[in-house]
Image (cartoon, rainbow, N blue to C red):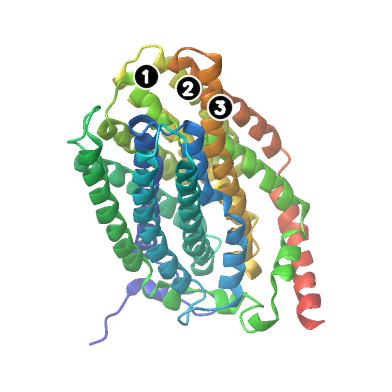
Amino acid sequence: MARVDISDSQTDSFGLPRVTLLTMFRLGLFQAGLGIMSVLTQGVLNRVMIDELKVPALITTGTLAMAQFVAPARVWFGQMSDSKSILGHHRTGYVWIGTVLFAIAAFFAVQVVWQLGGHLPAWTVQTTAWVATLALVFAVYGLAISASGTPFAAMLVDVSDEDNRPKLVGIVWSMLMVGIIIGAIVSSRLLKEIELDTPIEILQVQINRLFFIMPAIVIGLCLLATVGVEKKYSRYGTRSILADREDKVTLGVALRVLTASRQTGIFFTFLLVMTISLFMQDGVLEPYGGRVFGMTIAETTKLNAFWGTGTLIGLSSTGFLLVPRLGKKNTTKVGCLAVAVCLILVVMAGTTANQALFKGVVVLFGIASGVTTTGALSLMLDLTAAETAGTFIGAWGLSQALARGLATAAGGAVLNLGEILFSTPLLAYGLVFVTQSVGMIIAVTLLSRVNVREFQTNAKQAIATLLENELDG
């Protein structure tokens, strides 16, 4: 007897089934995997490099940022997934291949880190070569993230309708936080034997084990999340005028689509400033916990769980409580201002050296980050044309990834500047957090110029006309 899915009785105007709640959570497993990977690179590896191996902060954050500086490839991968299918799918094939590649690259990066640490503190030609190699590995890691993440985000547009898309976004990005929380807790348990003065040989064994087990789990989550979803739920073939004309679509056409509305440029700039201001602490928060609060690697890794819990609360409540009452734009403004306040509290907590207070502030910072992220993501999808979802998602991904790369590198640079200007670690790290707070205020002023209605009224017609002329001419 054939299994009957009651939810499939709910179909759209083309007779396609609407994505179910269970499928939304399934899709979220991929984001959970990305959350786990972010804990490994931004929560474990940065701490090991800066505190244990004594790699300069700017070198550490600069090499980590290479994963974001290859972000222009996101536009290309998004456009490719719009126009060229892999393994019979416009999105899923890219997601699978990219996931396997970034899992391998992450493990290889750790091996390079050990080689780099072995050549310090002396600075030789070999040291420079290992820094360059590490930067290259993280660039490959970033390309793989782009190849999987951008088509995945486009698939969210493909499988959803305007009325259920906010719920899908809220669930999927909440699962990112679930991944961060789980990744932080599991990683902390696997690293609990490491103390502040653990010999490098023992540290190496523990970290290598972590970077083998966790990426393997991420690959499994990716497959569980995506197998069969695109084939069953995607509306791409019925929405996109590119679906049957993919051989005529070029990257030049895609880039002209992105410039069809001035609102895309304004929002692009807002995303840059907001993301830089939100993520400058990515590479320095765990070392801050080690230097100012005397926390072990396991303890600072668990900070990701506190931040992730707060962000999960912010993400899950914003879409259902704040956005319906305040609107997407005002919700984003409130989130940005809350982040600015929390960053000041992070510095104030450092004056007490109280770990419990610090963890509480990190939770509040996570809540504010969740509110900001949900509001910005909702605005982003409102400023995405369904006809070229992959290209638009690639553009937004480009903005965020470049900003995160700049933020990570800038965090290390400002920290090094702080160490030159100030004699105490608290003031040096505090300079990073205060700079972020100021940036958030600037982001709020930029956000006031964003007009979603202008995009929806003028841009979609301009895009349709542009595509008609380009593809027929």
Query: What residue would you read off at disc 3?
Result: 414
Q: Amino acid at mark 2?
A: Tyr
Label 2 crowd bin: few (<14), some (14–19), many (20+), radius 10 Å: many
Gap between marks 2 and 3 measured at Cα: 8 Å
Q: Secondary structure at mark 2?
A: helix
- Residue at horizontal 60 percent and vertical 31 percent from the top: 440
Q: Where's residue 392, x and y in %?
A: 63, 61
Q: Which residue is mark 2?
A: 429
Mark sitting on residue 292: 1
Compared with residue 80, is residue 346 higher up or lower down, i.e. above or below?
above
Instruction: Name the kind of residue labelled 1 in the image.
Output: Val
Element under disc 1:
helix
152 with respect to 401 (left or right): left
Residue nearest the viewer, comparing 97 with 161: 97
Q: Position of residue 274 (x, y in %)?
A: 60, 38
Specify which label sits upstream in the sequence, 2 or 1.
1
Question: Which x, y percent locates residue 473?
Answer: 82, 81
Q: Quadrant of residue 96?
A: bottom left
